[in-house]
Image: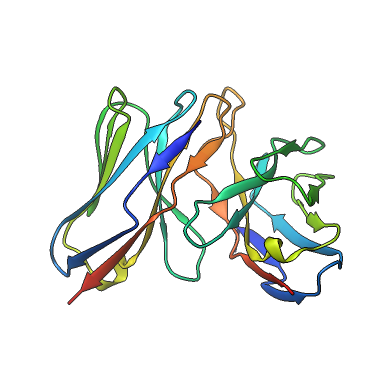
């Protein structure tokens, strides 16, 4: 079944540890995104990538890094986790318009629930 | 700054109609989107408006007024499965989505 796969689905992590959340899509979408979702707040963009080989910072990039070595994979790394990074993380992808911009119809993974103690 | 406002929570009765409002102030406008998110699940795309007016899709309709910075999502013939959060998002001049905090819709029998 085509879509986006995230791993792990849930993780408890000690503060200071390094963690990578994996995201893979098989829809050949150019644009990919990482969001975090916290209670009472809207989805907040962490990092994005408009195409393989390029990445950009979103609204809340501090403490996170990403890479986009190919079209399908977009991992998110927390170099040294802190309790404020406890959240639900969603990876998403979108197709490109004829003019090259990303469309707003995003396809989301099932989310990764991360708890940092 | 950019912001999207929508009510935090609404309650409606099964079989009825409910309207969820969204107002926005963004740097540029390249479309308004509504997503549905059931508890514990990922958001899923519902609708897209870029021109003023009403877009109808089955029991769901979405309206846009760009001059007023306003949209609403109309849900008809409510079913229990419509209990979810509804997220309003606007694509700004940089083609980035700005998200509202979501409206939790509770459907009562």
Give the residue displayed 72% in from the left and 66% down from the top: A83
Answer yes or no: is residue A41 visible.
yes
> Total marks drawn?
0
Q: Eyeballing the image, is B109 above or below B38? A: below
| Display colour scheme | rainbow
In the displayed structure image, the side of residue B34 where residue B65 appears, left or right: left
Q: Eyeballing the image, is A49 above or below B107? A: above
Where's the N terminus of chain A, which quadrant? bottom right
Answer yes or no: is residue A28 visible.
no
The answer to which of B7 and B71 lies nearer the viewer is: B7
The answer to which of A30 and A80 lies nearer the viewer is: A80
Where's the C terminus of chain A, which quadrant? bottom right
Give the residue displayed 51% in from the left and 30% down from the top: B1
Q: Residue A36: where, in percent of width, then height?
A: 61, 55
Q: Residue B31: where, in percent of width, then height?
A: 42, 31
Q: Eyeballing the image, is A93 above or below B65? A: below
Q: Residue A96: where, in percent of width, then height?
A: 59, 34
Q: Residue A91: where, in percent of width, then height?
A: 64, 55
Quarter assignment of residue A86: bottom right
The answer to which of B3 and A102 lies nearer the viewer is: B3
Give the residue displayed 76% in from the left and 37% down from the top: A55
In the displayed structure image, the side of residue A12 where residue B43 appears, left or right: left
The answer to which of B7 and A46 lies nearer the viewer is: B7
Quarter assignment of residue A75: bottom right
């Amino acid at each position: 079944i085509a879509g986006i796969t995230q791993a792990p689905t849930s993780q408890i992590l000690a503060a200071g540890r390094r963690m990578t959340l994996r995201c893979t899509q098989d829809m050949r979408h150019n644009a990919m995104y990482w969001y975090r979702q916290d209670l009472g707040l809207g989805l907040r963009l962490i990092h994005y990538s408009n195409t393989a080989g390029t990445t950009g910072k979103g609204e809340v990039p501090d403490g996170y890094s990403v890479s986009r070595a190919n079209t399908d994979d977009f991992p998110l790394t927390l170099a040294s986790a802190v309790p404020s990074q406890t959240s639900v993380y969603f990876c998403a992808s979108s197709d490109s318009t004829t003019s090259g911009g990303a469309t707003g119809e995003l396809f989301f993974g099932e989310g990764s629930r991360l708890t940092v103690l | 700054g950019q912001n999207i406002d929508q009510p935090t929570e609404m309650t409606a009765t099964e079989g009825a109609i409910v309207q969820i409002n969204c107002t926005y102030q963004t740097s540029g406008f390249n479309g308004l989107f509504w997503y549905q998110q059931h508890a514990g699940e990922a958001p899923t795309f519902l609708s897209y408006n870029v021109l003023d007016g009403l877009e109808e899709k089955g029991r769901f309709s979405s309206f846009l007024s760009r001059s007023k910075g306003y949209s609403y999502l109309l849900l008809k013939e409510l079913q229990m499965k419509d209990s979810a959060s509804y997220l309003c998002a606007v694509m700004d001049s940089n083609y980035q989505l700005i998200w509202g905090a979501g409206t939790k819709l509770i459907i009562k029998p």
